[in-house]
Image: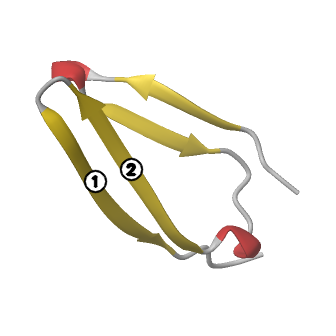
């Protein structure tokens, strides 16, 4: 089961990922990977959904 997610470009070329209606089952690690002519960069973030 997947939830609707959207990305939006912000200032200075930064991107944000919005996970709409996140649930506890969405808790986990998410990886962002950027690739261009200068190379590859990757980072990981932990998401913990609390509440209902």
- Identified at 69% across, 58% down, the residue is 22
Q: Position of residue 19 (x, y in %)?
A: 62, 47
Among numbered discs 1 and 2, the one appearing first in the sequence:
2
Q: Position of residue 16 (x, y in %)?
A: 40, 37
| Residue for badge 2 | 32
Is 20 above or below relative to 46?
A: above
Is 46 above or below relative to 42?
A: below
Crowd band around label 2 with a 10 angstrom C-alpha radius: few (<14), some (14–19), many (20+)? few
- Identified at 54% across, 42% down, the residue is 18
The residue nearer to you, when weighing 23 against 45, is 45
Colour pattern: secondary structure
At mark 1, the secondary structure is strand
- Identified at 48% across, 62% down, the residue is 30
Q: Position of residue 41 (x, y in %)?
A: 21, 47
Label 1 to label 2, Cα distance in Å?
6 Å
| Residue for badge 1 | 42
Is 6 above or below relative to 49?
A: above
Is 2 above or below relative to 35?
A: below
At mark 2, the secondary structure is strand
- Identified at 35% across, 46% down, the residue is 33
On the image, which quarter does residue 51 sit in? bottom right
Image quadrant containing the C terminus: bottom right
């Amino acid at each position: 089961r997947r939830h609707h997610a959207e990305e939006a470009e912000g200032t200075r070329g930064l991107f944000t990922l919005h996970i709409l209606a996140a649930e506890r089952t969405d808790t986990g690690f998410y990886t962002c990977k950027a690739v261009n002519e200068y190379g590859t960069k990757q980072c990981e973030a932990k998401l913990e959904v609390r509440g209902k």
